Image (spheres, helix red, strand yellow):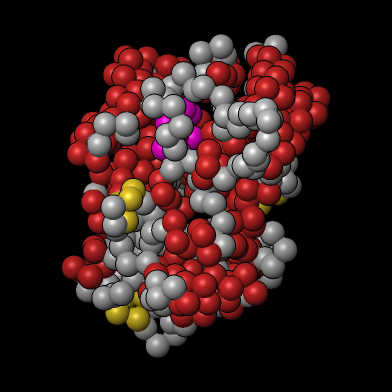
Amino acid sequence: MRFGGKTFIISALPLLAGLALLAGGGSSADAQSNGARIEGVATCAGSTCHGRAEGNGEAVRQDEIATWQEPSSASGAHSRAYAVLSSPRGRQIIASLKGAGNYRESDCLGCHTTYEPGVAKGPRYQISDGVGCESCHGPASGWLAAHYAKPATHDSNVANGLRRLTNPQVRAGVCLDCHYGSRQTGQFVTHAMMAAGHPRVSFELDLFSALQQHHDEDADYTGMRGKPATDSVRLWAVGQAEAVARATDLFARPDFGMKGIFPQYYFYDCHSCHRPITDGPQRRLTFETNPGRPIPFGQAPFNDENIIMLSSVARSLAPGRAAAFDAASKDFHRAMGQGRGEAASAAQRLRGEAAALSGALAGRSYSGNDAFLVIQTIANTATAPRFTDYAGSAQAVMAVDTLLNALVREGRITNGAAASIRADINTAYAAVRSPESYRPAQFRAALGRAANAIGRLR
């Protein structure tokens, strides 16, 4: 497939069904403080700006609105985000929450449109636009009139209020606001929402960036505009670190981590509990012991899909921080069996380690062998036994596919060679096609075959 001029060879993922219901917004705190105003999608949609039917502009493609509105692919998910609230599924979710007395309209708007309460809206703003340009790029009043002028650079646009999405930590923060959750109004998916039918939230920064990419990284992009070329390994790795930091930060906050006397179950691995329960003469165990989770028998585990990936990243790309991160991860899981206070403190320590890794990964230089190294670490004997559950396994196969795509784009692996590995990757995808059919042993075997095949091409 191609999105915004970028070749992308990922298989179709049922996991991405939630993209239409989960769309990213950004923090409104800075916009409120500097008096910025959201101008609306229509201000970007002129035929001499971003509204052309074909991507043949001299400086930028100029068909960005068409990509954003694409009705048949994930690239148009943001434009559909508001409309899905009135879809059959959206109406059912809202009706269930209303019936339980657990619904406010703002709970949905923070991620299903460019909402940002407290930030002024221009006359062309429409809530029905869904997640528009300014949800990601920031309120446009300060930079709209100047960002296309020839003297403008990325730095000058950022100085005028444009978000620096070329910085992987900034981009991850904007995406995570809705593709995991934030403290902003309407940007946190509760267990009640999921019980009402909201899809499981899953996040992978490089994959989601590729699905939404609407520009070409050409000479204008890296030259006159002064933007750095994207490094997919850096983007993926920093995304994993920021996801762990965000999850543990929110969990440590009592107004997010608790719901009455119970924990907020949104943070936990859904499918560790939502499995078939049968009563018969012989037991049927529906779990495997996970070496990364020193928790009491029978306890629901924290969803550690990003923690597992970040552990692999640390051992591959930041070995000096790996032992401290793994220790903090195990302490966090262990604290779940001790009490809320202990778990919150351990979450804060793990957040600190994840944030330190994010900084190290964002600041290091990357070589052509890094993707090979991470792929091998994800599938090696130290990591593979941790793929006991659906969520972590789905994250792992997305990671291997994402990193394989990076190797193809960088010319380290040919398209033909990648295609020869596709069968094994598709087998791994098939193993996580649905939680009901997930089989850990088959998944680990398929992932191992794919990783070994990629390693032989090094």
Name the residue furthest front. Answer: 281
Q: Is residue 193 left or right of residue 5?
A: left
| Residue at x-position 31% and y-position 45% | 251
Residue 309 falls inside the magenta stretch: yes
Query: Could you say where residue 336 lies in the image, as x and y percent from the top left?
Result: 32, 34
- Please report the bounds of the magenta region as a residue range: 301-310
| Residue at x-position 35% and y-position 23% | 330
The overriding secondary structure of the stretch rendered in magenta is helix
User: Is residue 371 visible to us here?
Assistant: no
Q: Can you say which quadrant of the picture contains the C terminus?
A: top right
Query: Could you say where residue 340 lies in the image, as x and y percent from the top left?
Result: 24, 40
Q: In the displayed structure, would residue 455 be above or below residue 305? A: above
| Residue at x-position 44% and y-position 43% | 268
Pick the residue in front: 239 or 59: 239
Question: In which quarter of the view is residue 344 placed?
Answer: top left
| Residue at x-position 46% and y-position 77% | 98
Query: Could you say where residue 289 lies in the image, as x and y percent from the top left?
Result: 51, 22
Q: Is residue 433 left or right of residue 217?
A: right
User: Is residue 76 visible to us here?
Assistant: yes
Pick the residue in front: 440 or 143: 440
Query: Could you say where residue 351 lies in the image, as x and y percent from the top left?
Result: 28, 35
Q: Is residue 411 left or right of residue 308?
A: right
Residue 86 falls inside the magenta stretch: no
Pick the residue in front: 303 or 360: 303
Q: How many marks?
A: 0
Q: In the displayed structure, would residue 307 be above or below residue 132? A: above
Q: In the displayed structure, would residue 363 be above or below residue 383? A: below
Pick the residue in front: 282 or 2: 282
